[in-house]
Image (cartoon, coloured by chain):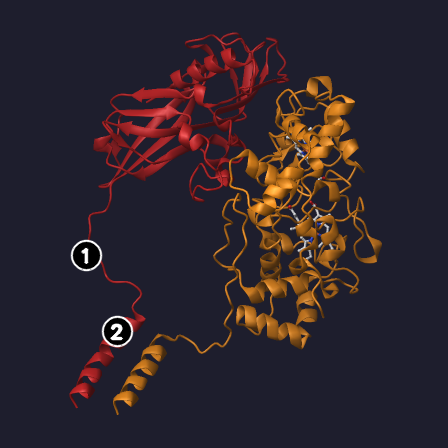
């Protein structure tokens, strides 16, 4: 009798708190954030779950989100190139081309705005862009959502993640955003250099990598940071290797692409673009918003002697008056050696980020 | 039977507790808060970014960024843990809002800059709400060794006094590093009570005074310092002038 009453008490206790009898039970996802990175702020309305990340990964690699089932996000954001595209201008549906170079998808959880011109403020908002874009996937969202909903697999997965049978574009974006937030790159040689420089205790694996850092790479890093050297660190800096701002780095005397101005409407923003991360930079050619430079040598030459002055050039391109920082041949090699340390081989071969099995 | 009764009487209690998230609290006195705003001026007029002002030399000057850090707000042994970041473009006049009793801070000592301990700590380790967290500091942080930028001014000027406006000359003053941290002292802070718990005061930054006192800056020739090697003299004059331009 005693036991029956106890049992009843527990059942009633549980039942009294239950709001609905939903059976979806998403498992919280623990992000693996490198110990030299800041905390990632996750939007309250899109908490990370194992199921959500897995669903996002499926969608990221699914060509169903394009008009003729030919293109997925991964077509222009390929893991082996740090989730960017080696083409200057990516091919969208029907081989349409845009005017901007694809961007690397790295450490997106710390970005404060998205696209070269910052026209999206959140990752969720950003993801709503490429699907209907005529030079990308060219599929209007109503149709995209219907196509996704035709699959029993997706209907079940969306229920497991969001607890609703109705698939919406917002939920598609949320799931993909969850996956994108897991694309964290923090295990390059540069990370070990950064940790060593700043007094972190290195793991034995990191110590072994540190032992392999060459004098050229160290000298290149010094140049990178030096005001009288390459002077790069004002904009590409810290654990994330970028600061969050728009800047005109002197590509053109007269801007051909207005950049941020097209969004803000202010002529003070002419030719300004999002400062990109330099992580995995050796893998993400071609370079700049329009992919105008094919190699890192060309980029270095730009900052060294090819800078064009204009009314909106960033004052932190300090040697613009003389066309750039004027590096000699040896310095250019050192700088390039350093830029190569930013490649994160674990990141580009991480099986959690690759195309999922069918 | 005894047990049954016990369990039965425990049942409503169980029900009660199983749903409860937190206990009701005794009404406590709401903590006192202070709010310090910072408003920039150019002489007697309020200063706005991207507007053009005229210096005594008849140069035209247009400010593009005005930012600064202050830390270690203290009075008679009380030190606030807060760091205040002013960033005119991003957060307008907001500067410091924290729990403290204005009565305890009738005068204030503070640093223009960051105390050396925090200046060289891991910028990723501060809480996400802290102005020192690297995501908030952003380009106000150079690196662990040099630390944070204490004062950050970008402007454009026209040094040719004629009828045309041609702002083709850059000013860029980014001063940091421990040796340039300045001690500030403000006596008789004019707090006004805006509610039972909140007191407010407005700090002013006169960017015209900044150009002339105590050192007269030669904007034509001394237009850049990023606290680099060989710029110590200019850096010191800049940050002293900046500290001197702050008052209630």
- Coordinates of residue B178 in the picture (x, y in percent): 44, 23
Does label 1 or label 2 sit earlier along the sequence? Answer: 2
Image point (53%, 43%), residue name: A36
Q: Which residue is mark 1?
A: B26
The chain coloured orange in the image? A
- Coordinates of residue A101 in the picture (x, y in percent): 75, 44
- Compared to residue A82, the image places residue A300 above or below, namely above
Which dot marks residue A278? none
Chain holding disc 2: B
Q: Is residue A69 visible?
A: yes
Q: Is residue A253 visible?
A: no
Side (left or right) of A167 relative to B215: right
Determine the image quadrant of residue A245. Answer: top right
Q: Which residue is mark 2?
A: B16
Q: Secondary structure at mark 2?
A: helix
**Viewer-closest of B59 and A90:** A90
As drawn, which residue projects farthest toward the right?
A95
- Coordinates of residue B239 in the picture (x, y in percent): 45, 17
- Compared to residue A98, the image places residue A304 above or below, namely above
The picture's colour for chain B is red
Side (left or right) of B28 relative to B72: left
Chain holding disc 1: B
Give the alpha-carbon distance from disc 1 to disc 2, as whole Å: 19 Å
Q: Secondary structure at mark 1?
A: loop
Image point (67%, 64%), residue name: A59
- Coordinates of residue B186 in the picture (x, y in percent): 30, 21
Q: Quadrant of the N terminus of chain A?
A: bottom left
- Compared to residue A175, the image places residue B136 above or below, namely above
Density class for disc 1 (Cα within 10 Å; few <14, some 14-19, many ≥20) is few
């Amino acid at each position: 009798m005693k036991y029956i009453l106890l049992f009843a008490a527990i059942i009633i206790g549980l039942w009294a708190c239950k709001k609905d009898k939903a059976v979806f039970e998403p498992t919280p996802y623990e992000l693996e954030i490198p110990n030299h990175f800041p905390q990632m702020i996750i939007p309250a309305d899109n908490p990370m779950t194992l199921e959500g990340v897995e669903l996002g990964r499926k969608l990221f690699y699914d060509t169903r989100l394009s008009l003729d089932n030919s293109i997925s996000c991964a077509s222009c954001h390929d893991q082996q190139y740090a989730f960017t595209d080696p083409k200057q201008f990516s091919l969208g549906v029907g081989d349409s081309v845009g005017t901007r170079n694809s961007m690397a998808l790295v450490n997106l959880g710390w970005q404060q705005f998205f696209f070269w011109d910052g026209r999206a403020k959140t990752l969720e908002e950003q993801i709503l862009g490429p699907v209907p874009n005529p030079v990308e996937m060219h599929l209007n969202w109503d149709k995209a959502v219907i196509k996704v909903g035709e699959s029993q697999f997706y209907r079940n997965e969306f229920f497991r993640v969001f607890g609703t049978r109705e698939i919406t574009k917002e939920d598609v974006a949320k799931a993909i955003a969850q996956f994108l937030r897991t694309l964290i790159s923090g295990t390059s040689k540069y990370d070990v250099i950064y940790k060593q420089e700043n007094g972190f205790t290195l793991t034995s694996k990191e110590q072994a990598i540190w032992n392999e850092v060459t004098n050229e790479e160290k000298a290149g890093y010094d140049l990178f940071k030096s005001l009288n050297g390459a002077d790069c660190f004002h904009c590409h800096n810290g654990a994330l290797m970028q600061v969050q701002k728009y800047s005109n780095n002197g590509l053109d005397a007269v801007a051909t692409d207005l950049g941020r101005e097209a969004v803000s409407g202010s002529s003070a923003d002419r030719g300004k673009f999002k400062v990109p991360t330099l992580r995995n930079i050796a893998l993400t050619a071609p370079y700049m918003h329009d992919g105008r430079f094919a190699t890192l040598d060309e980029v270095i030459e730009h900052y060294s002697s090819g800078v064009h002055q204009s009314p909106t050039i960033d004052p932190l391109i300090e040697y613009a008056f003389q066309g750039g920082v004027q590096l000699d041949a040896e310095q250019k090699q050192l700088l390039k050696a350093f830029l190569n340390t930013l490649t994160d081989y674990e990141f580009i071969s991480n099986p959690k980020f690759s195309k999922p099995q069918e | 039977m005894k047990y049954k009764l016990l369990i039965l009487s425990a049942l409503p209690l169980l029900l009660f507790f199983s749903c409860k998230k937190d206990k009701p609290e005794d009404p406590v006195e709401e903590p006192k808060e202070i709010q310090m705003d910072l408003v920039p001026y150019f002489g007697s007029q309020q200063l706005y970014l991207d507007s053009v002002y005229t210096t005594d030399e008849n140069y035209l000057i247009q400010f593009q960024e005005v930012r600064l850090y202050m830390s270690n707000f203290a009075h008679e042994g009380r030190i606030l843990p807060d760091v205040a970041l002013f960033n005119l473009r991003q957060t307008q006049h907001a500067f410091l809002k924290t729990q403290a009793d204005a009565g305890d801070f009738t005068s204030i000592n503070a640093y223009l800059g960051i105390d050396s301990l925090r200046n060289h700590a891991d910028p990723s380790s501060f809480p996400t709400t802290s102005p020192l967290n690297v995501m908030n500091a952003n380009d106000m942080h150079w690196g662990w060794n040099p630390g944070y930028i204490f004062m950050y001014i970008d402007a454009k000027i026209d040094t040719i006094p004629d009828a045309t406006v041609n702002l083709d000359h850059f000013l860029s003053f980014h001063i940091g590093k421990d040796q340039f941290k300045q001690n500030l002292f403000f006596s008789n802070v004019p707090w006004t009570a805006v509610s039972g718990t909140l007191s407010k005061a407005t700090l002013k930054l006169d960017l015209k005074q900044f150009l002339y006192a105590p050192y007269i800056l030669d904007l034509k020739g001394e237009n850049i310092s990023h606290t680099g090697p060989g710029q110590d003299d200019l850096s010191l004059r800049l940050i002293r002038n900046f500290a001197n331009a702050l008052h209630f």
